């Protein structure tokens, strides 16, 4: 694993994407096919099945390090990463080895057939022959979430450099339901792509937030506008007599949304639709929390299916009659999409997302202002002659969201962050006034600069009133403006409300504690926008 | 309760028998100072007492102050207390302070490390009944590699940057860490440039007889182009500033015990982080505590709650000392 550890070290020691890509490409040129395949798997969010629990790992690590478990537990939030904490507390290894990455993954997979005592022996044996960096990576293989500053996009680019293939087609090869157990490096990357996995989606085209004014985009006639729905971005695929539903996070969600099984009754094979999966009330989407009830369920009870039926609001046609249409202009794809969906029955689980007609940007701005009435977050702007690109690209697609709602709230609890934010207080709970009481109503983690996080961290340390494990109750003092995209009633929360995408938009140094908003203010917002 | 030779007040550590404070954070009549870092040597006291090795830096930093000095190991009677200063190994001139009253011995460690660094007077274990220990790095995840190994990494980084036409900018606390690094690096690799804050301290220490390699003070009339392949040593705050941009293409690094943590390393967004600290690591703290043979341990400066709980589970009578300044892990201040 020394070559993989060296790769990690190089990547970890730089903040420059070009250097990371170069290092990873060099690795792809020299590593064995097995190691390459697993590296691709790890950096695309796949990992070996977990053979030991993190609780067991903690206990064993404390034991061999000669420290009590609580001491390891106390160190964890300060380090901010369990795999790293364990790698750092363990005593120096007793011997050296240089077995390949795939060996260790195979070793981890083989544990599942062993009893717990044997698993422990094998893990301790591994720790005893790995240096601290290798241990960290080995532990990461177990604890999961292999996030070490390499995105799938960066990995794909490095692989493209190493194999002389073009990036979008590689991205397409890497999508779908493959695992290192069910394919080989050759089949995945090198073989002719004729036997493409029929369930495979196309890489999603992602939009940036519009940072200026729409006037900067040029003539309105060159653009199409749609509502930006607050649902789940998804591709629905009909191929080989089957249907498949993929989320933007490349999760196969076919079983969660059985509604789409009926699509094969209306539409023919060789079809890929891109759109937003929403819970549908008949004429408009339900609020997002209705859909939320569906997201967590892998199998859906009948009652829920009835209470929160989903449809796809389709806005793009990526494949039709087996032909990849992504290179054709949007107006062409859109016309074919409309023709295809026009004559479907009203209860079909797919509808063409209605385009919005406008002549001027000013007129569109007025339409945008009504987005919340349509249960939308704002608008999507798409250039009419644009192809369907892969990944997040600037230029042809833009999100033009509504300004968020805001409240001023008091910080009452603080907790340290993880990873890059370890050792800083970054996770906060906020409250509003209910008479003389402060009622917690949301958490927020983002929106401040590193400098502001450092400041608030120093303040939290000096103003801690009480500790509950990693959570600190602090003196109510600081007021923050909390921005959010939506507000819903929630019986699970003490305040009775839940926010969508809350974040800290401003540190209100200017605002005294007493002038923070009240629970009554929140209830008014719920009344208006919920 | 044992005889309270030292007590903990809102001004800092206080000795009733001798009517003096140790490293106080509010103005007092008489302050005994362990070392010259800003969170220990504060301005505004009427009289200062420190080691003769520490005094020049204190004068440099605090200006016109009334300082009395003692040698390491020399005993001084103050009121009913006998006081002596012993090397803490934290930086040149740094001391632990031993206070004895009626046969009861307390030691205030200040900041310390037990491994010799080639610059500071090496740490000396001082047997006592009660030991006030810092615990900046009092968690079992903090363990330091051998200084020679880190020196090799540091020199390899510099040499590679020099060979590839980049400057090497190293962020380190101006007093102590910067000079220790100067003693670790190989001056044969190239020229060494220093930020004013570092160079001023160098001058004070050179004047005292501490040996440092030749350095070039970066002043407005220095042209970085004339010093290709240089190593530039500057306070952490100078990295990423306008000041640092004059050196052109550069690799940046920090030298600190915090670099042991990947999260901190990444947050600092430097190219490299060298794990080198002037504080004791986990094993060093435990070794120091064992060697004092003290039964009562007072934990201050650092992960005090966790460290005291650990010591109690190990059979010590340990307590947390509240400190008003120098939070748990103030990265800017703690080298």
Image (tube, grey):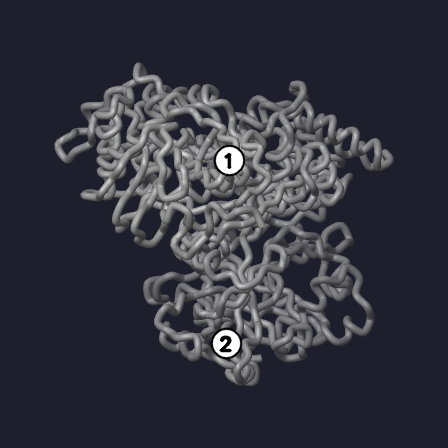
**3D distance between C-alphas at marks 2 and 1:** 49 Å
Label 1: which residue? B260
Chain on which label 2 sits: A
Q: Position of residue A67 (x, y in %)?
A: 67, 37
Same subunit, labels 2 and 1: the answer reads no
Q: Is residue B12 visible?
A: yes
Where A511 sits versus B76, above or below?
below
Q: Is residue A67 left or right of residue B19?
A: right
Q: Which element type, helix, strand or loop, lies under badge 2? A: helix
* Quadrant of the image containing the N terminus of chain A: top right
Label 2: which residue? A371
> For the residue carrying disc 1, how many other residues have a C-alpha within 10 Å: few (<14), some (14-19), or many (20+)?
many
Q: Is residue A155 left or right of residue B250?
A: right
Where A10 sits versus A294, above or below?
above
- The quadrant in which residue A52 appears is top right
Where A234 sits versus B161, above or below?
below
Residue drawn at the location 17% of the way across and 29% of the way down: B223
Q: Position of residue B12 (x, y in %)?
A: 41, 51
Looking at the image, is mark 2 or mark 1 nearer the viewer? Answer: 1
Residue drawn at the location 33% of the way across and 45% of the way down: B31
Q: Nearer the viewer, residue A141 or A513?
A: A513
Q: Nearer the viewer, residue A21 or A460?
A: A460
Residue drawn at the location 54% of the way across and 53% of the way down: A416
Q: Position of residue A394 (x, y in %)?
A: 42, 53
Q: Which element type, helix, strand or loop, lies under badge 1? A: helix
- The quadrant in which residue A29 appears is top right
- Per the rendering, the mark at residue A338 is none
> How many callouts does the rendering have?
2
* Quadrant of the image containing the C terminus of chain A: bottom right
Q: Is residue A277 left or right of residue A453?
A: right
Q: Residue furthest left?
A: B221
Q: Position of residue B103 (x, y in %)?
A: 50, 37
């Amino acid at each position: 694993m020394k070559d993989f550890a060296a790769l990690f070290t190089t990547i970890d020691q730089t903040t420059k994407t070009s250097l990371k890509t170069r290092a990873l490409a060099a690795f792809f040129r020299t590593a064995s096919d097995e190691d390459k395949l697993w590296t691709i798997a790890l950096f695309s969010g796949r990992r070996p099945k977990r053979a030991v629990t993190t609780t067991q790992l903690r206990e064993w690590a404390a034991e061999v390090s000669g420290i009590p478990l609580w001491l390891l537990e106390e160190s964890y939030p300060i380090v901010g990463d369990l795999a790293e904490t364990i790698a750092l507390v363990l005593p120096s290894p007793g011997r050296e080895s240089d077995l390949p990455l795939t060996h260790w993954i195979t070793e981890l997979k083989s544990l599942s057939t062993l009893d717990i005592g044997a698993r422990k022996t094998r893990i301790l044996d591994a720790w005893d022959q790995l240096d601290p960096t290798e241990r960290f990576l080995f532990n990461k293989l177990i604890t999961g979430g292999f996030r070490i500053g390499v995105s799938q996009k960066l990995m794909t680019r490095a692989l493209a450099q190493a194999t002389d293939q073009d990036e979008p087609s590689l991205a397409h090869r890497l999508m779908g339901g493959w695992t290192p157990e069910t394919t080989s490096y050759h089949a995945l990357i090198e073989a002719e792509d004729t036997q493409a996995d029929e369930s495979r989606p196309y890489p999603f085209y992602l939009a940036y937030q519009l940072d200026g004014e729409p006037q900067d985009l040029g003539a309105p006639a060159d653009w199409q506008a749609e509502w930006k729905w607050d649902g789940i971005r998804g591709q629905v695929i009909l191929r080989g007599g089957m249907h498949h539903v993929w989320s933007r996070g490349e999760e196969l969600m076919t079983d969660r949304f059985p509604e789409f099984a009926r699509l094969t009754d209306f539409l023919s094979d060789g079809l890929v639709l891109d759109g937003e999966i929403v819970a549908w009330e008949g004429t408009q989407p339900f609020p997002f929390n209705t859909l939320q009830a569906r997201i967590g369920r892998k199998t859906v009870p009948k009652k829920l299916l009835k209470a929160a039926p989903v449809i796809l609001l389709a806005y793009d046609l990526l494949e039709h009659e087996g032909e990849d249409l992504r290179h054709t202009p949007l107006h062409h794809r859109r016309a074919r999409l409309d023709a295809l969906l026009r004559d479907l029955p009203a209860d079909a689980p797919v509808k063409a997302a209605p385009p919005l007609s406008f002549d001027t940007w000013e007129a569109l701005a007025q339409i945008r202002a009504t987005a919340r009435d349509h249960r939308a977050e704002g608008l999507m702007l798409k250039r009419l002659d644009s192809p369907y690109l892969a990944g997040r690209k600037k230029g042809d697609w833009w999100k033009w969201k509504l300004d968020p709602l805001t409240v001023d709230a008091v910080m009452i609890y603080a907790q340290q962050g993880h990873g890059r934010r370890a050792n800083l207080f970054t996770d906060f709970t906020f409250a509003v006034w209910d008479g003389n009481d402060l009622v917690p109503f949301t958490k927020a983690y983002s929106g401040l600069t590193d400098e502001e996080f450092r400041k608030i961290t120093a303040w939290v340390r000096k103003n801690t009133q009480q500790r509950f494990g990693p959570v600190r109750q602090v003196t109510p003092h600081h007021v923050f403006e909390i921005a959010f995209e939506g507000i819903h009633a929630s019986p699970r929360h003490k305040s009775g409300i839940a926010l969508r995408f809350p974040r800290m938009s401003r540190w209100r140094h200017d605002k005294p504690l007493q002038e923070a908003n009240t629970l009554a203010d929140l209830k008014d917002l719920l009344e208006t926008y919920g | 309760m044992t005889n309270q030779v030292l007590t903990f007040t809102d001004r800092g550590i206080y000795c009733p028998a001798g009517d003096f404070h140790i490293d106080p954070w509010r103005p007092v009549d008489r302050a005994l100072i362990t070392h010259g870092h800003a969170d220990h040597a504060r301005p505004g006291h009427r009289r200062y007492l420190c080691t003769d090795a520490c005094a020049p830096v204190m004068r440099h930093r605090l200006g016109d102050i009334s300082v009395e000095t003692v040698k390491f190991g020399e005993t001084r009677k103050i009121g009913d207390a006998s006081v002596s200063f012993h090397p803490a190994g934290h930086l040149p001139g740094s001391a632990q302070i031993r206070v004895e009253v009626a046969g009861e011995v307390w030691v205030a460690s200040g900041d310390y490390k037990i491994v010799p660094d080639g610059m500071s007077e090496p740490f000396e274990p001082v047997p006592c009944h009660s030991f006030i220990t810092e615990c900046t790095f009092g968690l079992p995840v903090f363990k330091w590699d051998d200084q020679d190994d880190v020196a090799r990494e540091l020199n390899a980084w510099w040499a590679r940057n020099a060979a590839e036409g980049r400057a090497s900018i190293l962020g380190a606390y101006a007093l102590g860490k910067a000079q220790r690094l100067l003693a670790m690096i190989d001056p044969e690799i190239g020229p060494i440039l220093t930020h004013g804050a570092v160079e001023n301290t160098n001058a004070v220490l050179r004047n005292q007889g501490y040996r440092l390699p030749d350095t070039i003070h970066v002043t407005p009339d220095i042209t970085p182009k004339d010093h290709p392949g240089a190593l530039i040593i500057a306070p952490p705050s100078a990295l990423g500033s306008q000041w640092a941009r004059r050196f052109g293409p550069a690799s940046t690094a920090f030298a600190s015990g915090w670099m042991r943590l990947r999260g901190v390393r990444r947050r600092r967004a430097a190219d490299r982080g060298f794990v080198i600290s002037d504080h004791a690591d986990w094993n060093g703290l435990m070794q120091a505590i064992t060697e004092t043979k003290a039964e009562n341990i007072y934990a201050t400066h650092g992960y005090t709650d966790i460290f005291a709980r650990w010591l109690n589970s190990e059979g010590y009578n340990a307590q947390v000392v509240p400190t008003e300044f120098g939070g748990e892990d103030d990265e800017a201040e703690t080298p």
